[in-house]
Amino acid sequence: MTENQDANGTATIREEDARRVLAAIDADEAIAFLRGLVQIPSVNPPGDVVDAVAFCRAPLEAAGFACQEVEQDAGNRKPNLIAELHGGDGPTVCFNAHVDVVPTGALEAWRHDPFGGTLEGGRVYGRGAGDDKASVTAQVMAGVALARSGVTLRGRLVVNEVADEEIGGPAGARYVVDAGLIRPDYVIVGEQTLNRVCVGEKGTAGQTVTVFGRAAHGALPWEGANAIEGAAEVVAALRRELWPSLEARTHRYFHHSSASVNMVSGGVKGNVVPDRASFMIDRRLVPGEDPATVNAEIVAVAERVVADIPGLRVEVTPSDEVRPATMADPSGPLVHAMLGANRYLGLSTELTGFSMASDGRFFAAAGHPTIIYGPGDPKLAHIPDEWVGVDEVLEATRAYALAALALLGGST
Ligand SMILES: [Zn+2]
């Protein structure tokens, strides 16, 4: 029996075990599972995932997983699946992905039925095909393959398919983690990374900037202080002074730090000088950036600009969820296992960072080492005619299975 050894001499994937697990993956079954899952419209809101979770549970239970569904509020139709495959007393590996999907938007924009699960040209089309049912499929099928292979695991595999990710996870991953329902040693969150290994995800530090002025008749603007015009000056200053510097805030694994003004509101009527205007900044952080410092930078620019305009004042309020970037140890066992799986399969071995937010942030914040990895292109998420390539889903299935195998090691 051969063993693959990494540079540190740590045993990774035993060749015979790898062959057994890969042989237990049934491509037709995986594709049929993905199509069937897409055909269940688990749109959030309202986020009813009862049928989608039951669909995931069935093959895992049949393969020997001990399954339970946990819910924050009984009856809110947002169950979360916790399916466990018990081996020895070794570590716990958790696969996590979400079964809820965003609404379709205007149906006229779709060429395919959003809930048809159409297979065409090697792609499965539909809302959620990529985000995130491709990852769910690959995780469930990897779990099934590990169980069917008969390879003895020295630890435990948990397949955790959750509700509520698309509205921030309160009844989904956040609940599962905060309630301590899973205590994994390693977490692989499935989101669209083109099957590249993401060592962590960017942080967020959204801010709402509100400028207060003085109302007046629109024909007598000199009697008022125009909050919209003041807010526009603040936006221009941020764009001129602060945003360019963010491009210099880089990290070896991540796209640079960023900011974007994404919502604006203000004014009451076309002939009234507005006394209030606000805009929201979507601010994304690379590792090393501190949300408090980020807030202070914006406050400094806003206050200086507004101080020069008589009659105005400004307030900057951080959003409810402010957090630094997360990162697993790039040279730790989890990253090592996932990269090893990709290397084995001839996929990318370049470590990268996830630009968006995922449910991984809850696991990482609770101290569980977490990476993000999954099939599909994030640019195709949330748009009409969303699709995922069947080959990518099968590659992810193999990669998840091999990564779990590396971490849970087949015992002799
Ligand atoms: Zn997603």
Image (tube, grey):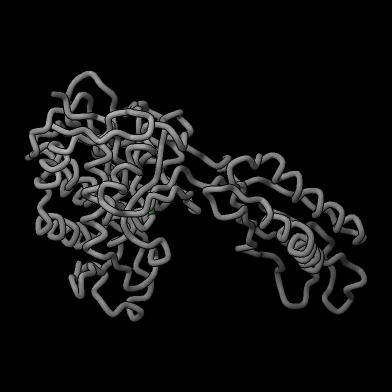
Vertical relation: 307 (above or below) 229: above
Q: In the picture provided, is 360 more to the left or to the right than 55?
A: right
Q: Residue 305: which quarter of the image?
A: bottom right
Q: Where residue 402 sits in the image (x, y, percent)?
A: 23, 41
Residue 268 vs residue 356, the one in the foreground? 356
Front-lying residue, 346 or 105: 346
Q: Quadrant of the N terminus?
A: top left
Q: Can residue 45 be seen in this view?
A: no
Residue 290, image x, y percentages:
66, 39
Quadrant of res 237: bottom right
Q: Ligand 1: which quarter? A: bottom left
Q: Quadrant of residue 318?
A: top right
Q: Position of residue 38 (x, y in %)?
A: 22, 61
Residue 346's spot in the image, x, y percent? Answer: 28, 53
- Position of residue 69 in the picture relative to residue 220 (left or right): left
Using the rendered image of the protein, determine whether residue 372 is visible from the camera's viewpoint: yes
Q: Residue at x 58, y 42 (%)?
A: 287
Q: Which residue lies furthest to the top in this view?
A: 89
